[in-house]
Amino acid sequence: MIKLLILGPTGNTCRLISKLAIEDEEIEVVAACDISHIDEELGFVVGVNDSNKIRITDVNNLQDVINETRPDVVVDFTVAKATEKNCIKCVENGVRCVIGTTALSEDFLTKMEELVKENSAPAVISSNMATGVNILFKMASLLTNYLGDWDIEVLEAHHHRKLDSPSGTALTIAKNISNSLGVKLEDVAKYGRDKGPNKRQVGAKNEIGILSVRAGDIVGDHTILYAGSGERIELKHQAHSRNCFASGAITAVKFIAIAKENKIYSTSEVLGL
């Protein structure tokens, strides 16, 4: 049985993760921490019967929660500022992490790599844990090998409440493309299309466009556009609901609970891609 700590269980995605975790026979939710709904029953908040009657605890008491419950794994799909504080504390206590938060800083990722090794606490950190998206990552890397001279644009759309832009998934796609081309993303990335006389740099080795839309309640759309002379190819993934992210997180929890190598894993590795 995997003893699971959930951070931010009242968030959109973590509500679904919490529900799936409570219902999973291989997982025991031992604690849940948040900044709201303190002392309310987790099962009631996420809409599922929880026989353990776990109550949501103030995340400011995270160390006490870890000491009392000794979780094997923590899952965090909150915001970067919170994740960078709370998951450091978790891994310092030897708790294995599954992190789906985006817009994480390079300083945090570097620190996590060090702590994962020091504390023998491997982690999964991924901008998107949906199976289809990770297959899209793989397909983009393969297709780019043949179309490096074409224009390549990455387009993403999300709900108007999303804080970061471009999305972490779009940046991962663009990074995979630039790696396949043998160029640095920071040298070729073009964010948006500003009005003005700036000349378009033709070919993905010179410029990769990354374009964002924030509107309504769009869960998550990502399109990779490959455009050549007289033809184009589009790869597209649409998330119809957050269920794909939540089920991917549960798969990652089960993977990291038994992972042998002390490192940060990607979802592609979790899925064996």
Image: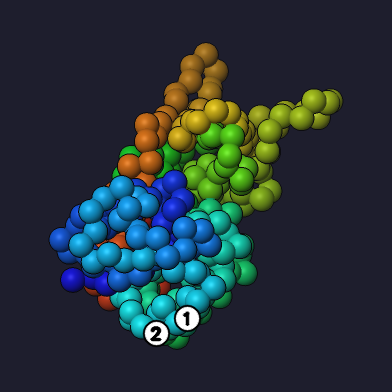
Name the residue beneath numbered marker 1.
Answer: 63
User: Quarter holding the N terminus?
Assistant: bottom left
Q: Position of residue 78 (x, y in %)?
A: 50, 56
Residue at 62%, 69% in the rendered image: 107
Position of residue 157 in the picture relative to residue 238 (left or right)? right
Position of residue 210 in the picture relative to residue 90 (left or right)? right
Work out whether 89 lies above or below 80.
Answer: below
**SS of the residue at dot 1?**
helix
In the rendered structure, are the residues bearing label 1 and label 2 in contact, judged by CB atoms less than 8 Å apart? Answer: yes
Q: Nearer the viewer, residue 167 or 53?
A: 53
Work out whether 210 lies above or below 6.
Answer: above
Name the residue beneath numbered marker 2.
Answer: 67
Work out whether 228 lies above or below 134.
Answer: above
Residue at the farthest top position: 230
Q: What whole-number distance in Å separates the C-alpha atoms at marks 1 and 2? A: 6 Å
Q: Quadrant of residue 3?
A: bottom left
Residue at the farthest right position: 197
Q: Position of residue 34 (x, y in %)?
A: 48, 63
Give the class, few, some or many, for how many residues have Cα within 10 Å of label 1's Cα (few <14, many ≥20): few
Q: Position of residue 129 (x, y in %)?
A: 37, 50
Amino acid residing under circle 2: Asn
Amino acid residing under circle 1: Gln
Residue at 45%, 82% in the rendered image: 64
Camera sees residue 112: no
Residue at 31%, 66% in the rendered image: 54
Q: Position of residue 239 (x, y in %)?
A: 39, 34
